[in-house]
Image (tube, rainbow, N blue to C red):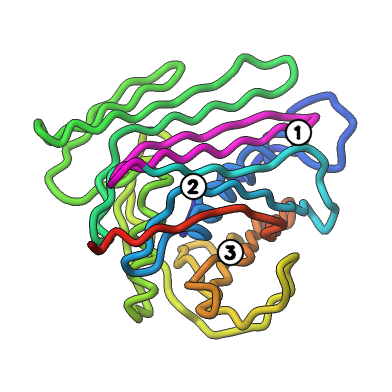
Amino acid sequence: MIPFPLSLAHPRTLKVRSPFPTKAILKGYGLLCGVLLCLFQPAQAQSIDFVDAKFSVQFNNTPTDGANFLKITRDHHRYDVDFELDHWLASASQKATFEMDHCKVRPISYVATSKRPLKEETRQTLAFDWAHKKAQYKSNDEQKSFNLDTAVYDPISFFFEARCDLMAGKKQFSYSLINKGRQNTQTYKVIGTQKVKTGLGEFEALIVERVRDSKKRQTRLYVAPSLDYLLVKIEHQEGRLLNVVATLKSMDYRLTDTSK
């Protein structure tokens, strides 16, 4: 469930007429990719065969144009996740491969790319070598190695385990992940319930908030127990410059029973 840590973007990064900072758009979509993955983690013995989902996104109360989709495929215990954004001001993608067995997730690889007008494409990768307990991080200008002595995740795979914890009734949970060349711990807690209107109808949802040191940044996830704990909405506030709201618009998916 949480996404990718956002940093405050400068509103004049590009000389392009737009109501939104371009860099903030990319960072906001990065956040949304991660949390929207929680939509489709299977309940109990029900595992995903495939998912093809589309969602709407608002920046500062204004709908955005462009294609925003999420695809998930499964081959036994191996999952491939592909998130794509194609916006007139920016494009971005995040892809991850991981294994999951009985709600225990082991990441294999992660790739994130982004492109802005008049800028070179940025790219970061993570490769997990569990046999040697090492994770290798690479970006355009940096390389790092991380130890895998305990459970560590990429910005996508940990969401699948987080949803399992929420379904188990936990009210607060923490995960260690590697993102943008840094390893940190992210903590979430359930703070209440609220009815949420979506393109699929209205649902009673749990409000799950990320615990942050800064009061200027707030991330809330709305998870519907009646929809097998699917994430139906996310809100993120980044100071006074950026407010992002994402809502599930449509999806096609199939589940399969892997308990036998």
Mark with earlier residue (3, 2): 2
Three-letter amino acid code at disc 1?
His
> Disc 2 on helix, strand or loop?
strand
Q: Quadrant of the C terminus?
A: bottom left
Whether label 1 touches label 2, CB < 8 Å: no
Instruction: Decide if residue 214 is on the left or right side of residue 130.
Output: right
Badge nearest the viewer, 1 or 2: 2
Q: Report which residue position mark 2 lands on.
A: 50
Residue at 63%, 59% (x, y): give it. Answer: 236
Tell me the quarter of the picture where residue 45 sits: bottom left
Residue 223: image location, x then y, percent: 54, 72
> Disc 3 on helix, strand or loop?
strand
Three-letter amino acid code at disc 3?
Gln
Mark with earlier residue (3, 1): 1
Which stretch appears magenta?
A: 75-98
Instruction: Decide if residue 64 is on the left or right side of residue 150.
Output: right
Which disc is residue 218 wearing?
Answer: 3
Residue at 73%, 74% (x, y): give it. Answer: 201
Q: Residue furthest right?
A: 17
Q: CA distance from mark 3 to mark 1?
A: 24 Å
* As drawn, 74 above or below 128: below
Q: CA distance from mark 3 to mark 2?
A: 31 Å
Residue at 46%, 40% (x, y): give it. Answer: 81
**Near-viewer residue (197 or 126):** 197
